[in-house]
Image (cartoon, coloured by chain):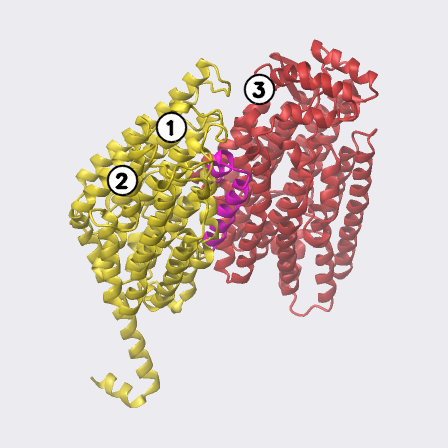
């Protein structure tokens, strides 16, 4: 079943590879392009349906991986109740991404659709492998299509720098991860998650393994010193690329923290907790303050993703049930809300006025009331307003953090205020006041249809928003649909952390007492 | 039995003597067929399971074992593949061109077949060498044919420069090797590899120890100059960039392959009982990695850039060679195979780009005839313009014009950069695993960091070829005819569009064999991860033999 889901997007893309695609404007070409897009969209929808079937069959109260398949060309596959949500998110976002750039991409449509389907396959494979080495391979291989998407279909000439930053940062970080994985492979002879879980990876106190993984994930998530690639890549990429980057690519790191840092290296995660927490706090406050001064609308949304991701990381490393569950929930919620915001600023208003500079925008509620309403709803959801799944996630994550360490929780909670400030500020500048004098017929690109220019959301745009809205509000009112499935694996994770940390502490205490105090050691031996 | 092969090779190489009667393209094809035939002949001479760790022939001057048998096969096959892409399809007709030079200067080409056959005889003898004398004779045979090959286009000052430079440096290397052999003979009185190995093993205290180390150092340095490892690398970018692309392919792929296979077999002998040589190799590998990564960053010439990238790859190969345990020799064999595939594919694609992107006179196309007339009026000699891609900027906008070919190019570059799930990543991973397993953590860190730096210039190539959407043909034509306003006018109006359509849409294309070759190599690189055991088993068995010899 998982193999089929991974293969399906690639199989689907085979159907349109024979269709002749040209760049002209004749009816035939447009028709061919739309056939290609429709095949791509329907492939991703079929994948979504299969994923939903898989989701309905999964056992929420089983330990370890289910549907394990050892003999696939993609490595050892298996899913559990955590990874299924990320697979669902991938399958849910890919059709939305394809649909969001439905009209703006006109040349090389075939390769555009193909790279998104390939990306979907790679991401689903990433979330379903149970092998450290294959984990690395998929973590890296998403870079190839992403680099090409940002570079070829991006907007301005700054896209080249953005693509280079995206690639070089991630490659640099993940090569340290490769060294660590090779070290583990050489020392333990296996890279399977199940087998590695049985080992105590803290052999010879190799703390550098943890930091090698941390650098890779900190670049991808991103944490403070390594965040410079993110807003550029998000801002300069084409809309669909931004959607995928924000919704799923950032979650690769979240998933990596859960699978590797917490599951395989819990001793180091706990002993270096304060480092990660302080990095996350710096990221949170710094990025929240930076958003206020941004003028690029897409960069604003990108920076707000950074601050939300740091809340996710705070929750993950809080060592409490509600913290970790809230972090997972928030990462899913962020996967619904940030694509919506990207589509608003990078798609809907960009396709009308062709600028991303926020100073030109004003008073859009005059011409676009439905846009104003939806934009407001998603903006306050982004700030974590109740009724949204963001609220539940953020609340649980911060509650867990507060439980773990009140000071960290306190500083982390300022993130809520900050996110309210920049979200409302963004909405205010775009939606209210008089209608912007810059947007009359003479200044805006004359190619834009007048109907589009002054019109509200089109049908495509509205139905693009609807599933995201339904998902956000639906899971916000009934968060237990997700949380119930998470209780079991997350408790398992915590028990595992507790066991290993206790084991390590006992070992060190025993060793120290034995060597330092001969009397005690004699007593210990006698007993 | 090996003599049978050599004699048959020389016999069939008489074919080029009938050069006046044989169609030029047919000659190149005949050479390929000969090479493919000989490669299969080699596989069938001995069965792998019978020869195990080797049989000696010619009184121990040559030894055949599984490793050099497989690599002879590989070498001849690669040689055959390089000589194939010598034609262009125009209006679905095979046009007779060479893969070297223009049609109107093709008379030199008739020597091409003879030279590459001699080169391959030298290479095959080199990897089967079991004696220092055989080694020297073989390496000279190989090198002389390479000097000739690089000056093949002998009316061009660039080729002459390259050939002279290559000859001077190459003969210097040969002399150093010869000096090493003489010193070795002075110290031990032996030239046979196995006798030497025995000699190193049985002597407890050797008065000539330092001379022996010195002599082996000389031989090693001579060989490393020939492959162009880092502190001795200065000739490679010059020579590679000055000769025509097809010759560059030959220079980059084959001598390295043969010399490294030789090193793979004698590395035990080289490293025997001396930490000095191992340190020398480690220093050379670190320098190769760093210089290869940083030197490529500021290149504007694509072949110079690829030369630096090959230096960076040599660093990885030498790391694997230095460690010299079973894991690392397996990694070495695999890396060598992967490196050969990827380099070959990149150069084949560059040749194809050259065919597609450039204007050159083809006699049965009417448009080109008119154009050539105009050109001859304007004192522009088309014959002087090679159809090589020389500068990185010439790749501008290729993705727009030929997306599939450009994607093959991109896949190769990503494989070089070591991005999974492509073949290059697995090779690098194996080398790193081997180097971590013996505790070379610092060396692995350098290797990893330099491969990130090197990734930058691979990405630059990708960026130029696919991110910029300029119209390739018009851009190139403007560059091509910039000193004649009249022609620029004509081209930018009617003729230019005509050419771009004629060239890039359907009528003109690279030949079928060429495109099959590129697609097969690309698929090998791309889909290796799905069934890795095919190649891994082979390299593992070979490493086992190499280690047991």
Q: Which element is circle 2 on? A: helix
Residue at (33% x, 38% y) in the render: A72
Query: For numbered disc 3, what is the local secondary structure?
Result: helix
Identify the colour of chain B in the image: red
Q: Is residue B484 left or right of residue B355?
A: right
Above or below, comparing residue B280 to residue A331 in the picture: below
Find numbered disc 1 in the image and state the secondary structure of the residue it sits on.
helix
Tag 1–tag 2 contact (CB < 8 Å) = no
User: Where does the magenta region start and end?
Assistant: A147-176
Residue drawn at point x = 37 percent, y = 58 percent: A284
Can you tell which quarter of the image residue B57 is in? top right
Q: Position of residue A59 (x, y in %)?
A: 17, 44
Task: Name the residue nearer the viewer: B36 or A495.
Answer: A495
Q: Is residue A424 left or right of residue B343?
A: left
Residue nearest the viewer, comparing A457 with A408: A457
Which chain hosts label 2? A
Proximity of marks 3 and 2: CB atoms separated by less than 8 Å: no
How far apart are the two marked residues, 3 and 1, measured between alpha carbons? 54 Å
Same chain for labels 1 and 2? Say yes or no: yes
* Residue with the mark numbered 2: A88
Residue A493 drawn above or below residue A526:
above
């Amino acid at each position: 079943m998982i193999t089929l889901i991974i293969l399906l997007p690639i199989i689907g893309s085979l159907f349109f590879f024979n269709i002749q695609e040209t760049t002209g404007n004749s009816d035939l070409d447009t028709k061919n392009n739309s056939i290609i897009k429709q095949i791509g969209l329907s492939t991703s929808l079929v994948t979504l349906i299969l994923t939903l079937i898989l989701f309905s069959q999964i056992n929420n109260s089983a330990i370890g991986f289910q549907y394990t398949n050892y003999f696939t060309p993609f490595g050892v596959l298996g899913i559990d109740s955590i990874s299924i949500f990320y697979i669902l998110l991938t399958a849910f976002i890919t059709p939305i991404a394809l649909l969001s750039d439905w009209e703006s991409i006109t040349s090389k449509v075939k390769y555009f659709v193909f790279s998104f389907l390939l990306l979907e396959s790679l991401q689903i494979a990433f979330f379903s492998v149970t092998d450290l080495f294959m984990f690395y391979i998929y973590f890296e291989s998403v870079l190839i299509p992403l680099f090409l998407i940002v570079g070829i279909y991006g907007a301005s000439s700054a896209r080249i720098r953005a693509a280079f930053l995206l690639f070089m940062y991630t490659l640099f970080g993940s090569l340290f991860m490769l060294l660590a994985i090779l070290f583990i492979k050489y020392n333990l002879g296996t890279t399977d998650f199940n087998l590695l879980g049985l080992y105590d990876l803290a052999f010879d106190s190799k703390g550098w393994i943890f930091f090698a993984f941390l650098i890779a994930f900190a670049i991808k998530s991103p944490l403070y010193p390594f965040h410079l690639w993110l807003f550029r890549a998000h801002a300069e990429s084409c809309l669909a690329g931004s959607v995928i980057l924000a919704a799923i690519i950032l979650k690769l790191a979240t998933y990596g923290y859960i699978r590797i840092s917490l599951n395989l290296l819990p001793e180091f995660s706990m002993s270096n907790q304060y480092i990660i927490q302080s990095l996350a706090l710096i990221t949170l406050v710094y990025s929240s303050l930076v958003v206020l001064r941004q003028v690029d609308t897409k960069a604003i949304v990108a920076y707000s993703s950074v601050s939300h991701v740091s809340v996710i990381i705070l929750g993950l490393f809080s060592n409490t049930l509600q913290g970790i569950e809230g972090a997972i929930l928030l990462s899913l919620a962020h996967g619904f809300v940030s694509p919506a915001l990207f589509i608003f600023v990078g798609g809907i208003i960009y396709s009308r006025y062709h600028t991303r500079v926020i100073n030109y925008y004003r008073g859009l509620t005059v011409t676009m009331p439905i846009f104003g309403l939806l934009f407001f709803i998603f903006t306050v959801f982004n700030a974590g307003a109740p009724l949204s799944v963001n609220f539940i996630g953020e609340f649980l994550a911060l509650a867990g953090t507060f439980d773990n360490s009140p000071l960290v929780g306190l500083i982390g909670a300022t993130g809520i205020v900050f996110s309210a400030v920049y979200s409302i500020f963004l909405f205010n500048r775009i939606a209210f006041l008089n209608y912007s004098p810059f947007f009359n017929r003479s200044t805006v690109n004359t190619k834009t249809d007048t109907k589009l220019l002054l019109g509200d959301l089109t049908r495509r745009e509205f139905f693009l928003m609807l599933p995201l809205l339904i998902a956000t509000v639906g899971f916000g009112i009934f968060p237990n649909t997700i949380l119930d499935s998470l209780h079991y694996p997350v408790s398992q994770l915590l028990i595992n952390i507790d066991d290993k940390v206790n084991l390590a502490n006992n070992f060190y205490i025993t060793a120290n007492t034995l060597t330092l105090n001969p009397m005690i050691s004699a007593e210990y031996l006698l007993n | 039995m090996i003599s049978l092969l050599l004699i048959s090779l020389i016999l069939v190489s008489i074919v080029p003597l009938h050069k006046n009667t044989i169609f030029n393209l047919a000659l190149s094809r005949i050479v390929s067929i000969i090479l493919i035939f000989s490669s299969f002949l080699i596989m069938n001479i001995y069965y792998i399971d019978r020869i195990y760790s080797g049989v000696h022939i010619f009184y121990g001057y040559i030894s055949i074992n599984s490793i050099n048998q497989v690599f002879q096969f590989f070498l001849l096959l690669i040689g055959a593949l390089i000589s194939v892409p010598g034609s262009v399809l125009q209006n679905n007709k095979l046009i007779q061109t060479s893969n070297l030079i223009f049609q109107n200067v093709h008379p030199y080409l008739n020597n091409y077949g003879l030279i590459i056959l001699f080169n391959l005889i030298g290479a095959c003898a080199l990897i089967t060498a079991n004696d220092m004398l055989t080694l020297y004779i073989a390496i000279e045979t190989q090198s002389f044919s390479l000097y000739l090959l690089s000056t093949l286009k002998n009316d061009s000052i660039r080729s002459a420069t390259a050939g002279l430079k290559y000859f001077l440096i190459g003969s210097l290397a040969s002399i150093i090797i010869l000096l090493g052999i003489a010193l070795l003979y002075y110290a031990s009185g032996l030239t046979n590899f196995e006798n030497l190995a025995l000699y190193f093993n049985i002597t407890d205290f050797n008065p000539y120890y330092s001379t022996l180390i010195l002599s082996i150092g000389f031989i090693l340095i001579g060989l490393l100059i020939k492959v162009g490892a880092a502190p001795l690398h200065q000739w490679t970018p010059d020579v590679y960039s000055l000769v025509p692309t097809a010759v560059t392919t030959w220079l980059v792929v084959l001598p390295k392959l043969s010399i490294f296979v030789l090193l793979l077999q004698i590395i035990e002998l080289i490293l025997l009982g001396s930490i000095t040589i191992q340190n020398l190799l480690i220093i050379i590998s670190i320098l190769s990695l760093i210089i290869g990564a940083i030197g490529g960053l500021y290149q504007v010439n694509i072949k110079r850039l690829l030369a630096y990238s090959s230096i960076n790859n040599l660093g990885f190969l030498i790391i694997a060679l230095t460690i010299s345990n079973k894991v690392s020799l397996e990694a070495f064999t695999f890396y060598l195979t992967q490196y050969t595939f990827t380099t070959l594919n990149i150069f084949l694609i560059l040749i194809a780009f050259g065919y597609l992107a450039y204007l050159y006179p083809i006699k049965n196309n009417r448009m080109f005839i008119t154009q050539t007339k105009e050109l001859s009026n304007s004192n522009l000699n088309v014959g002087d313009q090679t159809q090589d891609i020389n500068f990185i900027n010439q790749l501008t906008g290729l993705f727009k014009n030929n997306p599939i070919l450009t994607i093959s190019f991109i896949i190769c570059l990503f494989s070089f950069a070591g991005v999974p799930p492509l073949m290059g990543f697995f090779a690098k991973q194996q080398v790193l695993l081997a180097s971590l397993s013996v505790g070379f953590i610092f060396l692995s860190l350098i290797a990893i960091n330099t491969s990130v730096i090197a990734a930058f210039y691979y990405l630059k190539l990708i960026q130029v070829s696919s991110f910029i959407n300029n119209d390739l043909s018009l851009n190139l034509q403007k560059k091509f005819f910039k000193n004649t306003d009249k022609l620029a006018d004509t081209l930018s109006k009617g003729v230019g569009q005509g050419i771009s359509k004629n060239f890039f849409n359907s009528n003109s294309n690279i030949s079928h064999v060429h495109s099959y070759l590129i697609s097969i190599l690309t698929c090998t690189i791309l889909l290796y991860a799905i069934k890795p055991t095919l190649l891994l088993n082979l390299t593992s068995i070979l490493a086992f033999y190499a280690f047991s010899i």
